[in-house]
Amino acid sequence: MPQYDWANTGAVSSASAIDEGLRAHMNKVYGTMSVGMIITAAAAWAIAGLATTTDPSAAVAAMRNGTMITEFGSLIYSSPLRYVIMFAPLAFVFGLGAMINRMSSATAQLVFYAFAAVMGLSLSSIFLVYTGVSIVQIFLITAIAFASLSLWGYTTKKDISGWGSFLIMGVVGLVVAMIVNIFLQSEAIMFAISGIGVLIFAGLTAYDTQKIKTDYIAHAAHGDSEWLAKSAIMGALNLYLDFINMFIFLLQLFGNRE
């Protein structure tokens, strides 16, 4: 009579279930992130269209590059409201991170999409500064780089968890340097910030992808579906921020200005 190794069979079945669940979890992460990116792109394009005009009679002001802006454009780009728009995405990020444990996963997802729309408002000014072709080209370059880095972070056997503290310190240093450069207005410093920023967020893309994977594996056995749903949203937020920041820094480095 054949003997079956029920312990090994159970282990294989459990591992198979985790692999299947991990694929579904990563699909949720990338799907949520992708919807957020679409919302951001649509919001930025629509708002830029409302803020600019080719009709001199509808314009209330002109930028240094000659772009004519409407009354709405003057309000969001020239009035003190621009500072609120500038820092609103940051408030969303901190708010979502601090309150997600008290939200349902459905609410957290809606907040993420609202954040993506506000980010679109904040980024709409790039259409006034850079050519449309340049924006599309840099976006595609960023997408290819992001996909490659995220795939490497997911598949590599190397433990890169140690990168985390170093990369976060790099982000803090970037923020400080950018604040200082607001007063210095140095193109050389801005160029250096952009180059270092690309490298830091490239590293964070791989790091965050691996962390999403390892966090899922660590918690999947508990079967907490609500936690896993929220984890997918926070993972999508982290990867979204990595993509957006890498895109902005690449645009500053290589984008063609109007």
Image (tube, grey):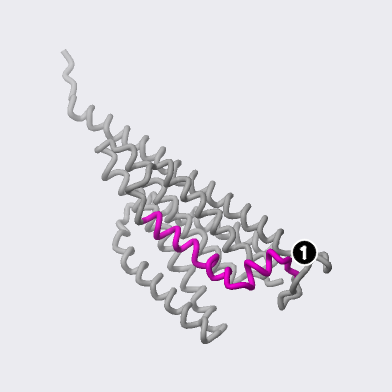
Verify whether residue 95 appears in magenta. yes
Locate residue 216: give its quadrant. top left
Question: What span is in magenta?
Answer: 68-97
Which residue: 56% across, 54% down? Answer: 117
Q: Is residue 231 left or right of residue 35?
A: left
Instruction: Classify 113 as above or below 61.
Output: above
Q: Secondary structure at mark 1?
A: strand
* Viewer-closest of 227 and 140: 227
Q: Main secondary structure of the magenta part?
A: helix
Q: Which residue is mark 1?
A: 53
Outermost residue toward the top?
1
Quadrant of the frame with the N terminus = top left
Which residue: 49% across, 44% down? Answer: 31
Characterize the local packing of mark 1: few (<14), some (14-19) or many (20 or more) Cα atoms within 10 angstroms.
some
Which residue: 34% across, 53% down? Answer: 211
Badge 1 amino acid: Thr
Quadrant of the frame with the C terminus = bottom right
Locate residue 72: give its quadrant. bottom right
Q: Is residue 110 left or right of residue 25?
A: right
